[in-house]
Amino acid sequence: MGSLTAFVIYAFALYAGYTSIGIIPIVVGISLFGVWGSYYSSDKIVLAMTGAKVIDHDTAPQLFNLVHEITIASGLPMPKVAIVQDAAPNAFATGRDPQHAVIAFTTGILEVMDREQLQGVAAHELAHVANRDTLVSAVAATTAGAIALLSDFLIRISMFGGGRRDNNGGANPLVLVAAILAAILAPIAAVLLKAAISRKREALADATAVAFTRNPTGLRRALETLAADSTVVHQKSNAVAHLWIESPLDNKMTSKLFATHPAIADRIANLRALEKTGPSPS
Amino acid sequence: MNATYVIVGIFVLLVVFGIIQYNKLVRLNVAVDEGFAQIEVQLQRRGDLIPNLVETVKGYAAHEKETFEKVVQARAKATAAQGVAAVAEADGMLTQALRGLLAVAEAYPDLEASANFLSLQEELSGTENKVGFARQYYNDNVRALNEIIVSIPGKFFAGPANVVEREFYVVNDPGKRDVPNVTFN
């Protein structure tokens, strides 16, 4: 979000003919403001982006109850609960802190899953809230954007000599090579970073969810249902991909390294291992 | 001169350490209180659902008087209970009585299919889960608190923080502890 804002402004600045290095602080400043804005109102932005409708106890008693159950198990405040009109079974959590958390379920997931499975999903989403993953993913996404932005600046500065047009001596070819390398490698590194952080957080959220419910079976069965399901959420936007419990982007084509979610089979295997050893008795 | 600095530094560190320990104990103690309050809130909610549930079942199965009486008695006891042990005992009894009531309901397909019963059943099982999770949260915090209090250095701060070891919430639920009798001859 923030980096996007910066890119737009940067593009405008280029269009207007300001290639001077002096514009960098302004762009960075505005992009930081954008980052802050998207962090501060991430709940509202994501709700608007996904078209989720907030519900209360009377409109969907079971869903509301089972989310409330997990808040009691975890000691978290009650989040807003929302439903997304989408036939594909999926769910996500967002919000800058536990006091402003939103967790959303698609109509599809409510149809295909029973109470125990939904409880596992709700626990997984609330685990994201408890672990502050929405904040972590926001920072990860922003860092990735910032690295890409920086490499772009680098390449422009080396090519145009930081805006100085007198060209005495010209650009150092070594700097240019480094900048080109950075421009190629940085975005890849950034994407990898973002994916790795997101993957670790998914595995952690599964573990935290089991700590809440003391019942690995529910989440394991839920993941099995998700794995068996071939429908995919229609919103294939990269921007919200990391939010969902099951990645909406088709990751069969991309390698495991780039996937924002660990392979669902790995997660199921982990939960099965927990079922065998048994969670700690309460 | 230098030695004074070292002594003052150690003293400051000790004070900071003491404050952290003290605050940890107080925080956990509050969490335990909150946990127990949450258990009571959910038990109260379950109690409030019972008259409605009994009335609904009565409409279809008026002659199952014994079951109704058990539930009503257990509810009265649960409402009167005070203190962790007593509340936990009454909680277990009521859980058992309710299980009996729901088992009765199973014999009446019309009742099981009625919208009123279905929504009551969802509220009841939701509340049962909430009671269970509240119990779990409470016991987790009691364990954390007691561990600190009985070990060093938490032991030294428990007195000043006015915190004592707390009681676990243990439910005697015969329905859940049906261990088969094994005899060795």
Image (cartoon, grey):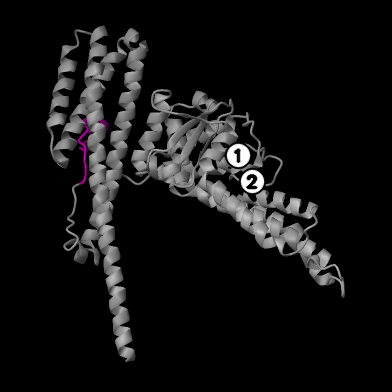
Disc 1 element: loop
Q: Which mark is residue A247?
A: 1
What is the three-letter code of the residue carrying label 2? Ala
Identity of the residue drawn at 18% across and 29% down: B93
Q: Position of residue B127 (x, y in %)?
A: 30, 29
Between marks 1 and 2, how big is the CA–CA gap? 8 Å
Q: Is residue A116 above or below residue B138?
A: above
Q: A262 or A79, which lies in front?
A: A79
Residue A77 lies, in percent from the top left, at: 37, 41
Query: Residue A259 — which label?
Result: 2
Quadrant holding the C terminus of chain A: top left
Which residue lies at the image location 30% right of the left edge and 69% below the top edge? B17
Considering depth in this image, is B180 or B183 the residue closer to the camera? B180
Mark 1 chain: A
Give the mark nearer the N terminus: 1 vs 2: 1
Magenta residues, as a range?
B168-185
Dividing the picture into quadrants, the one containing residue B110 is top left
User: Is residue A3 highlighted in magenta?
Assistant: no
What SS does tag 2 mark? loop
Image coordinates for residue A127, horizontal then vertical, percent? 45, 44
Residue sitting nearer the eye, A236 or A19: A19
Relative horizontal placement of residue A123, taking residue A30 as reference (left or right)? left
User: Could you tell whether A242 is left or right of A19 in the image?
Assistant: left
- Is-magenta flag for residue B171? yes
Residue at horizontal 37 percent and vertical 11 percent from the top:
B113
Residue at 30% of width from left, 76% of height from top?
B12
